[in-house]
Amino acid sequence: MTRFIHDLFAKEYLEELLSPLGTVNIGRDVSSEVREIDVYFTPITAIPEYSETLGLLGKMASKTAIFEPFRNPATASEICSCLGKSLDVRGELERIFRRENTRYDDDQLPRLWILMPTASKAVVDSFNAIPDTENWLPGIYFLGASLRTAIVAIHQLPETPETLWLRILGKGGVQQRAISQLTALATDDPLRIIALELLYRLQSNLVTDTQQELEPEERELIMAIAPLFQQQLEAAQQQGLERGLERGLERGLERGLEQGLERGLEQGLERGRQEQQRLILENFLRVRFGELTPKMIVFLFPISKLPAAEFTMLLLAFSMLTVDDAGRESAVRLLAESVLQVRSPELGDLLPAAVTNLLALPLAELRLFVEQLPQLSAAQLRQRLG
């Protein structure tokens, strides 16, 4: 079920964002019934600048905390279950304090944050939960002081930078808008990079691990993540261009100021772009399919020459493949098809047969054929693969 995929994303997401500030335990066992807490956080290192960057989430993590994220609105029964786990933890800590003869106050006990997209008035009222607008933003409802618990209705939070990192755990339009707001951050922002990596993993799991038809909301989420992928790719390509420019300048100066500079710039820019795309493709395939097959490696260099737009669309096509033997075979075929289409777009209806015949070649012959491909005419290509 997709709910478990989103639950895993929420736990990993909170772990990554909070780990610089302290110890994060996922799946902490409590009581003899072995009930698991989703995320148990203990602050260790005070980093005011980082906490401020996390906004509302950083404020919640200023003290020991339990986070219980829900993909859908939690029922009264589920909230009671969370309270039960929190009280079990309190009991364990109080026994430790007594055993060690240590004085303590309630501030040393964890606060429970129940995160959910929405919370109905009926549910909130059933726990006598009330807002604390003097100290906290709207959308947060606190139970009695001794229970040290708050219900966080993510969709009721104001859509400001302060709530961004919590709204990414929302649902539907709220989550999609939060994801789109990541584009305003610098491409080398560490939090942006962490969030994107986990969102790509979420996208991949939704596409490959779900045994049932995706809901429209899930498909919209996948599409919301795609532009960020494009932006990050363009940033990587720009970095490759800058490196290529630097190399081109060096080579140009070595060959002669006037002629060398012109050729060096041109070659350096193009080689830098191609090398960056090759590395992106290699890493993408390795993360998605594991160890690259010899045939995949053969196609890496010619694919790296694709224009940026076509290269991005190819990566998106790979992201939609299943992560199994069938998906790996489809990936190899997609690589071969892209190489042939670039070389000879007029193959038309002959393309499927040409791809099959190309992949049927022994590895040594395949490698040689791909190297010779730029020199072959369309007629020669049809003759050899027809």
Image (tube, grey):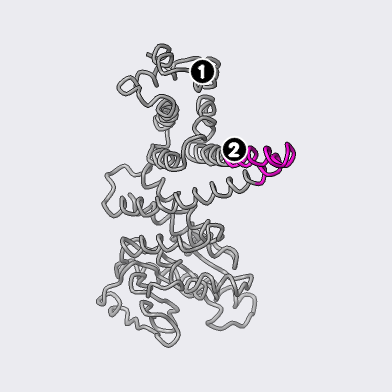
Give the mark, 1 or 2, whose residue is nearer the N terminus.
Answer: 2
Residue 266, compared with residue 231, is above or below; it is above
Provide the secondary structure element on which disc 1 rests: helix
The residue positioned 61% from the left and 48% from the top of the image is 242
Closer to the camera in the image, 115 or 232 = 232
The residue positioned farthest toward the right in the image shown: 254
> Do the numbered discs 1 and 2 sit on residues whose CB atoms are within 8 Å?
no
Q: Main secondary structure of the magenta part?
A: helix
Could you tell me residue 262's position as x and y percent? 63, 40
Visible residue check, residue 184: yes
**Amino acid type for the residue under numbered disc 1:** Phe
The residue positioned 43% from the left and 67% from the top of the image is 166
The residue positioned 68% from the left and 44% from the top of the image is 249
Closer to the camera in the image, 314 or 222 = 314
Residue 289, compared with residue 72, is above or below; it is above
* Residue that badge 2 annotates: 271
Closer to the camera in the image, 177 or 41 = 177
- 368 sits to left or right of 319: right
Residue 345 magenta-highlighted:
no
Assign the C terminus to one quadrant of the image. top left
Residue 369, label in figure: 1
Could you tell me residue 4's position as x and y percent? 37, 53
Magenta part of the chain: 246-272
Provide the secondary structure element on which disc 2 rests: helix
